[in-house]
Amino acid sequence: MPSPQPSESTRYWFKSSYSGGNTTECVECAYAATGAFVRDSKRPEGPMLTLKATAWQDFVDSVSVGQLTPPSPGL
């Protein structure tokens, strides 16, 4: 049986050190035993992504080696 996810009050949300100081274009992440949560920092009560640990690690690895590029303007 999977372990329950931590409640909202016990999650530690953090922003990237690359986040702008003007609160625009920012996401927050929170780690869990099974993966990570990602949400829009301007809408903390809004929807969030739930990622399995392997998917989160694949994403982090891809970003760290430059395999992901920003989308073209207007997309």
Image (cartoon, helix red, strand yellow):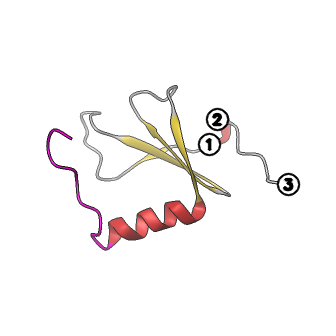
Give the extent of the magenta segment: 65-75
Q: Nearer the viewer, mark 1 or mark 3?
A: 3
Q: Secondary structure at mark 2?
A: helix
For label 1, the crowd category at 10 Å Cα-Cα, with few meaning under 14, some 14 to 19 and many 20 or more, is: some
User: Which residue in the rendered view is the most extreme toward the bottom?
Assistant: 65
Q: Which mark is residue 1?
A: 3
Residue 15 within the magenta-colored segment of the rendering: no
Under mark 1, the amino acid is Arg
The residue under label 2 is: 8
The residues bearing labels 2 and 1 have C-alpha atoms spaced at a distance of: 5 Å
The residues bearing labels 2 and 3 have C-alpha atoms spaced at a distance of: 21 Å
Disc 1 + disc 3, Cβ < 8 Å: no
Residue 5 in which image quadrant: top right
Question: Closer to the camera, 56 or 18?
Answer: 56
Disc 2 + disc 1, Cβ < 8 Å: yes
- Give how far across and how far down residue 68 sits, in percent: 29, 63
The residues bearing labels 1 and 3 have C-alpha atoms spaced at a distance of: 21 Å
Q: Earlier in the sequence, mark 1 or mark 3?
A: 3
Question: Closer to the camera, 3 or 19?
Answer: 3
